[in-house]
């Protein structure tokens, strides 16, 4: 039964609050929830705080309904509404399978905006230590790109329009790199 799909709830036996979710495999989903909760990194802050306060022994995982995978979202919505798990439980989103309906406070919106300002990519705002940079440089030394890789890179850049400012920066960087100008 634990390898089947359906709707589940994680119930706090101390305060009676519930988190309703859906899973293709109950065992995997419950293990994932427990792992995240034990590590203190669960995506649901309400549930994480309750877990930290009441302890693991206060929570039970219950299967509410077995359903075909095509019906998971529809039935999850039914149980969220029926058990009022948004208003009286741990669910954040009132709509199953969606973040729609979640309202961030203006303070939260400002923090998110500040965190993203001028940053892009997974390393945005993070910097490698000089030791790490040196190690990455040593690892790349002596590597040669294959002719296919060179052609693929060239094709990606072919026809690109660059501003005069960008061209000048590229010329300067190239001269510095190859001629060791000061």
Image (cartoon, grey):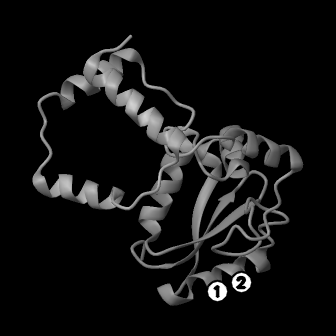
| Dot label at residue 122 | none
Q: Nearer the viewer, residue 161 or 117?
A: 161
Q: Image height check: is 42 above or below 90? A: above
Question: In x, y percent, where is residue 154?
Answer: 26, 55
Asked whether, in this view, residue 103 is left or right of residue 115, the answer is right
Q: Looking at the image, do the residues carrying marks 2 and 1 touch, with CB atoms under 8 Å apart?
A: yes
Reading the image, the residue beneath label 1 is: 74
Image quadrant occupied by the C terminus: top left
Reading the image, the residue beneath label 2 is: 78
Asked whether, in this view, residue 54 is left or right of residue 56, the answer is right
Image quadrant occupied by the N terminus: bottom left
Q: Image height check: is 120 above or below 79? A: above
- Mark in front: 2 vs 1: 1
Question: In x, y percent, where is residue 8?
Answer: 59, 71
Residue depicted at 71% across the width and 84% down the height = 78
Question: In x, y percent, where is residue 25?
Answer: 43, 72
Residue depicted at 69% across the width and 39% down the height = 115
């Amino acid at each position: 039964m634990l390898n089947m799909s359906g709707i589940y709830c994680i119930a706090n036996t101390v305060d009676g609050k519930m988190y309703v979710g859906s899973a293709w495999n109950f065992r995997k989903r419950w293990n994932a929830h427990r792992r995240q909760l034990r590590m203190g990194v669960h995506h649901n802050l309400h549930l994480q705080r309750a877990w930290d306060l009441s302890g693991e022994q206060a929570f039970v995982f219950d299967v509410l309904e077995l359903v075909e995978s095509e019906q998971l979202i529809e039935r999850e919505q039914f149980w969220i509404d029926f058990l009022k798990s948004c208003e009286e439980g741990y669910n954040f989103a009132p709509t199953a399978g969606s973040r729609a309906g979640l309202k961030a406070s203006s303070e939260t919106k400002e923090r998110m905006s500040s965190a993203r300002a001028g940053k892009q990519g997974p390393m945005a705002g993070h910097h490698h230590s000089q030791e790490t940079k040196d190690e990455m440089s040593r690892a790349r030394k002596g590597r040669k790109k294959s002719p296919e890789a060179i052609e693929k890179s060239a094709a990606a850049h072919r026809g690109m329009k660059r501003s005069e400012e960008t061209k000048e920066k590229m010329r300067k960087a190239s001269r510095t790199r190859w001629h060791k100008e000061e």
